[in-house]
Image (cartoon, rainbow, N blue to C red):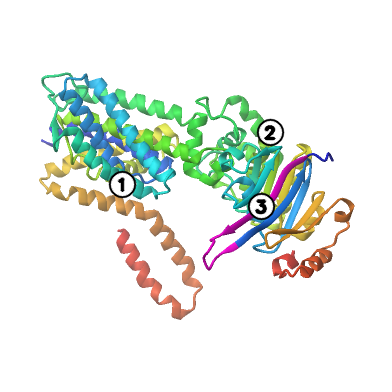
């Protein structure tokens, strides 16, 4: 692993609904450095700020304070669609990452042009199709024979697999996964996760993956962070991470005063 | 009698078909219910009529009208994207602005085009030739749109309408695409207005009243016709034009039956309302069937009456 920092979050603060009864301090002076080649798993209770952190990186909203540096470039003020050039994203909701009214191959073609100027050239070229077919075949879902089917016809697992493929089609500097297997049945979830690891290893992708599954969090990647109340309360990597057990994480979670919910324990 | 009026109905239907293609772009592709069109169709007609009354060539007048329509779309787009105003309200605001603008363009409530004294592209005095010209117009428009929505930029607009979140994540400038779509749509609507003013020989401040409903009716009728034939984009657009033609043939039929045409807008609106309600009622009705087995008796009492009411409303 090289130690070149690819992403730096410096003192990020974000409060939603400021001044109202629903005020929520989602991120509180959050600091994080992600090094090139890192595969980080993120865990934490509901409302810990995990998704908010990813959305802050993506630029879904403006942050109140702090600085976001990606690949040496300050992107704090960059609008979401411009940051997309550097980021591959998979959302928790399988419906979010694809356009239902367009064909499978058209979705892939959209993703292949992420971060590029969209000109008056054809939206999909014949020469691309063979490549897409090859990539789709890797999913093992038979989608390579349905390339002109509308994505709205696919199941959640199929759509999520497609989204993952789309996120990595045009190699991102950072792959952000927001509980991308949470809405899938266990078997499909396992397969999508396996494919995630395969893609990340093959393309040497720097990855941040939120998960509710503690076993997955320990097993996957080289580094694990635990969040609570908008801050990182535990950051572990290498051998120490590999030797972790679920009970260690729960213990640590309890120590920091977090409420353990069923979902975390059951997983 | 009815057959004599048929060519005229077809020509009018084709002109409104161009307008309905504009509605299709916002309503179906962009998922944006744009009410600007009630104003921009009149803007197109007013600009063309005033320019032609001043002696400008008919083609130049149409071109300027198209640009004016695009400008109207730009205003709605800015209201919606930069100022955060909801889609429907943005359109209504522009529509109201255009009411004043259209009056100012014409200087009065209507402007006459001298269809006998000067060259016009389409006219009700020669319906046969007019229909041929309109076919040519439609071939060019459908061809151009088919090409454009297949390009990288066009695919970006389609993605924007289908899933804005995903589009942003794929680096698509959603706001810009909405503005481009609105401009394109209203340019086509203004084109229809300019042709309509030439065809009927005048532009009138009320010519756009309820245009959105006619456009939606054409889109809905068109969808019903071609949905089982092909999902191809060009076929969909042709369906929309056929929808416009059918609408005006029905209109002509109602006149022929000597029914009170003052009811026509009401009937159009009701027909559109019913068609728009169908998907919702279908879902509600089917979900009711599933539900009926589960809830305890006490709660179930309310639902049969409700579903009966909903079904009645749909029929």
Q: Of residues A1 and B259, which is closer to you in this image?
A: A1
Q: Residues within 10 Å of mark 3 (few under 14, many from 20)?
A: many
Contact flag, marks 1 and 2 (Cβ < 8 Å):
no
Is residue A22 found inside the magenta-colored segment of the image? Answer: yes
> Residue A134, labelled with which disc?
2
Q: CA distance from mark 1 to mark 2?
A: 50 Å
Q: Residue at x 26, y 53 (%)?
A: B270
Say what secondary structure mark 3 lies in: strand
Q: Quadrant of the N terminus of chain A?
A: top right
Q: Of residues B311 and B69, which is closer to you in this image?
A: B69
Residue A50 placement (x, y as % from top left): 67, 56
Chain letter, disc 2 residue: A
Could you tell me if residue A263 is visible in this image? Answer: yes
Residue annotated with mark 1 = B93
Chain letter, disc 3 residue: A
Say what secondary structure mark 1 lies in: helix
- The magenta span reads A5-24
Residue A115 versus residue A255 in the image, above or below: above
Q: Main secondary structure of the magenta part?
A: strand
Q: Residues within 10 Å of mark 1 (few under 14, many from 20)?
A: some
Q: Are the residues under badges 1 and 3 in a single subunit?
A: no
Direction bottom: furthest residue: B298
Residue B97 versus residue B274 in the image, above or below: above
Instruction: Tell which tag, 2 or 3, sits nearer the viewer.
Output: 3
Residue B246 placement (x, y as % from top left): 26, 39
Q: CA distance from mark 1 to mark 3?
A: 39 Å
B156 to the left or right of A172? left
Q: Residue at x 72, y 48 (%)?
A: A208
Residue A210 versus residue B72 in the image, above or below: below
Contact flag, marks 1 and 3 (Cβ < 8 Å):
no
> Residue A12, labelled with which disc?
3
């Amino acid at each position: 692993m090289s130690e070149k920092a690819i992403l730096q979050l410096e003192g990020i603060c974000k409060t939603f609904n400021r001044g109202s009864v629903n005020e929520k301090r989602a991120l509180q002076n959050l600091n994080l450095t992600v090094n090139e080649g890192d595969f980080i798993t993120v865990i934490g209770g509901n409302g810990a700020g995990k998704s908010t952190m990813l959305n802050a990186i993506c630029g879904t909203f403006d942050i109140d304070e702090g600085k976001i540096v990606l690949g040496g470039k300050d992107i704090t003020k960059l609008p979401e669609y411009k940051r997309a050039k550097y980021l591959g994203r998979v959302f928790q909701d399988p419906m979010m990452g694809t356009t239902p009214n367009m064909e499978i191959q058209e979705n892939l073609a959209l993703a292949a042009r992420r971060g590029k100027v969209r000109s008056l050239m054809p939206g999909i070229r014949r020469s691309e199709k063979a490549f897409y077919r090859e990539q789709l075949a890797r999913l093992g879902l038979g989608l390579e024979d349905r390339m002109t089917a509308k994505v709205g016809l696919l199941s959640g697992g199929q759509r999520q697999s497609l989204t993952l493929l789309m996120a990595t089609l045009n190699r991102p500097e950072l792959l952000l996964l927001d509980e991308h297997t949470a809405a899938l049945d266990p078997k499909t979830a396992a397969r999508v996760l396996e494919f995630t690891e395969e893609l990340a290893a093959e393309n040497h992708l720097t990855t941040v993956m939120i998960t509710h599954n503690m076993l997955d969090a320990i097993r996957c990647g080289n580094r694990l962070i635990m969040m609570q109340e908008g801050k990182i309360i535990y950051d572990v990597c290498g051998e120490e991470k590999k030797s972790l057990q679920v009970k260690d994480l729960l213990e640590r979670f309890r120590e920091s005063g977090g409420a353990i919910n069923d979902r975390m324990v059951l997983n | 009698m009815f057959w004599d009026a048929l060519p005229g109905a077809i020509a009018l239907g084709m002109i409104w078909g161009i307008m309905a293609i504009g509605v299709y772009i916002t309503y179906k592709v962009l998922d944006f219910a744009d009410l600007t069109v009630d104003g921009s169709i009149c803007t197109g007609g007013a600009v063309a009529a005033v320019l032609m009354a001043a002696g400008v060539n008919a083609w130049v007048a149409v071109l300027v009208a198209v640009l004016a329509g695009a400008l109207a779309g730009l205003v709605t787009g800015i209201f919606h994207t930069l100022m955060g105003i909801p889609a429907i309200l943005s359109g209504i605001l522009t529509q109201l602005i255009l009411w004043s603008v259209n009056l100012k363009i014409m200087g009065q409530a209507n402007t006459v085009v001298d269809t006998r004294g000067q060259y016009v592209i389409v006219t009700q005095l020669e319906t046969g030739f007019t229909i041929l010209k309109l076919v040519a117009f439609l071939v060019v428009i459908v061809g151009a749109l088919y090409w454009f929505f297949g390009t990288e930029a066009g695919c970006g607009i389609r993605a924007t309408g289908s899933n804005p979140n995903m589009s942003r994540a794929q680096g698509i400038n959603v706001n810009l695409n909405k503005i481009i779509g609105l401009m394109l749509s209203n340019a086509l609507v203004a084109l229809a207005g300019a042709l309509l003013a030439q065809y009927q020989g005048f532009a009138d401040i009320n010519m756009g009243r309820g245009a959105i409903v006619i456009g939606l009716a054409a889109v809905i009728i068109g969808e019903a016709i071609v949905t089982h034939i092909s999902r191809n984009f060009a076929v969909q657009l042709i369906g929309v034009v056929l929808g416009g033609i059918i609408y005006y043939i029905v209109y002509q039929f109602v006149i022929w039956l000597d029914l009170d045409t003052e009811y026509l807008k009401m009937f159009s609106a009701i027909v559109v309302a019913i068609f728009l309600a169908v998907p919702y009622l279908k879902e509600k009705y089917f979900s009711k069937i599933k539900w009926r087995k589960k809830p305890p008796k006490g709660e179930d009492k309310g639902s049969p009456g409700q579903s009966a009411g909903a079904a009645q409303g749909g029929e």
